[in-house]
Image (cartoon, rainbow, N blue to C red):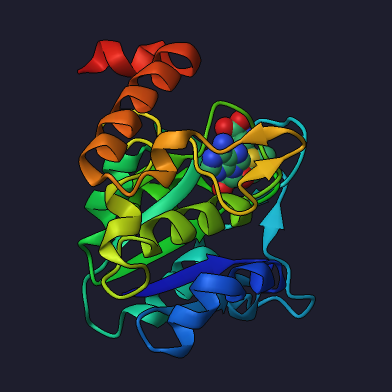
Amino acid sequence: MRFDILTLFPEMFEPIKQSIIGRAEKKNLLEINLINIRDFSKNKHKKVDDTPYGGGAGMVMMPDVVYDAYHSILNGKQASVIYLSPQGKTLTQAKVKELAKKDHLILLCGHYEGIDQRVLDEIVTEEISIGDYVLTGGELPAMVLIDSVSRYVEGVLTEESTKEESFAEGMLEYPQYTRPEVFHGNRVPEVLLSGHHENIKKWRQEMSRKITKQKRPDLLNKN
Ligand SMILES: C[S@@+](CC[C@H](N)C(=O)[O-])C[C@H]1O[C@@H](n2cnc3c(N)ncnc32)[C@H](O)[C@@H]1O
């Protein structure tokens, strides 16, 4: 899967190149391209933003620079453009799975007060938010989206890892334990040491329901 990221701060994406996502990129399961919007400024000072018409605080990213950066990646092809925005629909696991079916996504990161509405109207397919709060830029949200979507790209994780986890079946995951068997006087639940697969499955399902009821009862009401 290919991600093209339009950003004013490509250096902010260094963390996404680590761990599981970094390994998947090395194996060519993922391609993460960073496009610096500033490179498309025609201004001798590489200016990319200006004051808002009508007045008000902050700076607005200019439409022509953003458009030229976008146009440079298309090469005659079509691709969905996601604008990371606090005004978008909140990212959910269902949306993550839907996006993972695509071969190519362009992610547009705003900064400052945001981006001139005219270029958004022209190029954006959908707006996605990572929650009801305002961040300084779309870079962290883009990394959240890449990380969550990449987990569903074939070969990045084992299929089991994404089947039995929070939200996969509309519930939260059961608790996990590893060695040692006793930690600070607390034993691992006996059933997990029994080797009885049917009982382990039943216990995990019960724990999933219990934890979801405690922590996120709203999820149970959705089913
Ligand atoms: C300071 S914000 C602009 C907020 C905008 N003036 C508003 O009130 O809707 C700058 C950029 O950060 C990104 N951003 C901020 N909060 C976000 C969120 N919750 N989800 C996704 N992107 C966000 C967007 O790309 C946005 O263009």
Relative horizontal placement of residue 16, taking residue 103 as reference (left or right): right
Count the labels in the image: 0
Residue at 51% from the left image edge and 64% from the top image edge: 66
Instruction: Please identify the quarter of the rendering in which residue 52 is found.
Output: top right
Q: Quadrant of ligand 1?
A: top right
Residue at 61% from the left image edge and 47% from the top image edge: 181
Q: Quadrant of the C terminus?
A: top left
Instruction: Please identify the quarter of the rendering in which residue 167 is found.
Output: top left
Residue at 32% from the left image edge and 78% from the top image edge: 74
Horizontal and vertical percent for residue 114? 60, 45
Can residue 136 be seen here? The reply is yes
Q: From the viewer's side, name the closer residue of 215 and 152.
A: 215
Relative horizontal placement of residue 63, taking residue 77 as reference (left or right): right
Q: From the viewer's side, name the closer residue of 56 and 6.
A: 6
Q: From the viewer's side, name the closer residue of 34 and 47.
A: 34
Residue 98 versus residue 202 in the image, above or below: below
Can residue 91 be seen here? The reply is no
Horizontal and vertical percent for residue 1? 31, 75
Instruction: Please identify the quarter of the rendering in which residue 53 is found.
Output: top right
Horizontal and vertical percent for residue 85? 50, 41
Horizontal and vertical percent for residue 110? 58, 52
Residue 8 versus residue 50 in the image, above or below: below
Residue 76 versus residue 62 in the image, above or below: below
